[in-house]
């Protein structure tokens, strides 16, 4: 084995990215072409497969949460993909559902949204499992978990406002990559309302088996949630310092 081949193999062991692909003549090797086609199909499936809201609801309720289901103004997947603006607003039926939801001026509302990958929501319950008890132990008032379909990130702002929540956390399927069809993202927004921008949120991304593990994601989110309440802000003004350790004096 040459040094170059050994180096490429070492790199491949650290990433799912396509690096150092071989070739057959002027073309890619057949296995690489077929592998690309398979990953492309998986990414398309992630975008178009509907979220199983019943199964997800059971998982979340088994953790001790109440749940409600809402939809955006996008009536179907084709509309959702063509009109991102409609995925960011609640349908009139959804508003009515939230109005009927018991209100306790929650400190935090949690939204589980299909986004661009329903498959990513397989990681949502594990994240919630790590969040629930620490928040309850600290006396946080939690709204029922809202499961939202045909949803964009900004839909959580309207949901949080309708629930009169101080803060909203949305766990949402991220745009699939060619090696990550099930990546979950988490977005935290203080004082949610329609019109908030991404600059006013904090994001924790790449939550999946091959990426950030649910327990680690929950640890970061707990830090951000606590600091958001302490400083009454999220976004550019709140930097994620959760991974820093104190430097001992020498």
Image (tube, rainbow, N blue to C red):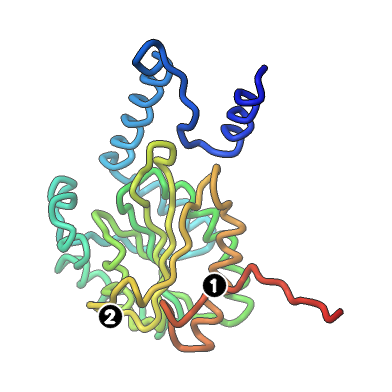
Whole-number angstrom distance, CA of label 2 to CA of label 1: 23 Å
For disc 1, the neighbor class at 10 Å (few under 14, some 14 to 19, many from 20) is some
Q: Where residue 16 is drawn, which disc sits there?
A: none
Q: In this view, does 36 lie to the left or right of 212?
A: left
Q: Is residue 250 left or right of residue 211?
A: right
Q: Name the residue under label 1.
A: 240
> In the picture, which quadrant includes the N terminus?
top right
Q: In this view, does 188 lie to the left or right of 63?
A: left
Q: Residue at x 37, y 26 (%)?
A: 36
Q: In this view, does 194 lie to the left or right of 218?
A: left
Which residue occupies the foreground of this view, 164 or 21? Answer: 21
Picture coordinates of residue 189, whole percent (x, y): 39, 76
Q: Where residue 193 is drawn, which disc sits there?
A: 2
Which residue is situated farthest in the bottom direction here? 231
Picture coordinates of residue 71, whole percent (x, y): 23, 59
Picture coordinates of residue 67, whole percent (x, y): 39, 63
> In the picture, which quadrant includes the C terminus?
bottom right
* SS for callout 2: loop
For disc 2, the neighbor class at 10 Å (few under 14, some 14 to 19, many from 20) is many
How many numbered marks does the figure carry? 2
- Depth check, mark 2 against mark 1: the one in front is 1
Which residue occupies the foreground of this view, 101 or 216? Answer: 216
Dividing the picture into quadrants, the one containing residue 4 is top right
Q: Residue at x 26, y 62 (%)?
A: 70
* SS for callout 1: loop
């Amino acid at each position: 084995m040459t040094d170059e081949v050994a180096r490429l193999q070492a790199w491949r062991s650290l990433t799912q990215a396509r690096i150092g692909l071989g070739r057959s003549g002027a073309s890619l090797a057949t296995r690489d072409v077929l592998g690309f086609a398979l990953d492309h199909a998986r990414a398309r499936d992630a975008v178009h497969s509907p979220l199983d809201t019943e199964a997800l609801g059971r998982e979340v309720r088994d953790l001790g949460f109440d749940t409600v289901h809402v939809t955006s103004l996008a009536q179907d997947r084709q509309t959702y993909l063509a009109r991102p603006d409609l995925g960011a607003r609640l349908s009139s039926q959804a508003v009515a559902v939230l109005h009927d939801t018991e209100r306790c001026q929650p400190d935090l509302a949690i939204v589980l949204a299909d986004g661009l990958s329903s498959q990513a929501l397989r990681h949502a319950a594990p994240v919630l499992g790590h969040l629930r008890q620490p928040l309850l132990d600290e006396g946080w008032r939690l709204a029922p978990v809202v499961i939202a379909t045909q949803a964009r990130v900004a839909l959580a702002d309207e949901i949080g406002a309708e629930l009169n929540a101080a803060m909203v956390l949305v766990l949402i399927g991220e745009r699939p990559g060619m090696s990550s069809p099930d990546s979950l993202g988490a977005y935290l927004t203080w004082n949610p309302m329609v019109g908030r921008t991404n600059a006013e949120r904090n994001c924790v991304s790449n939550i999946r088996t091959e990426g950030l593990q649910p327990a680690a994601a929950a640890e970061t989110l707990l830090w951000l949630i606590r600091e958001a309440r302490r400083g009454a802000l999220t976004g550019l003004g709140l930097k994620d310092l959760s991974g820093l350790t104190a430097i001992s004096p020498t």
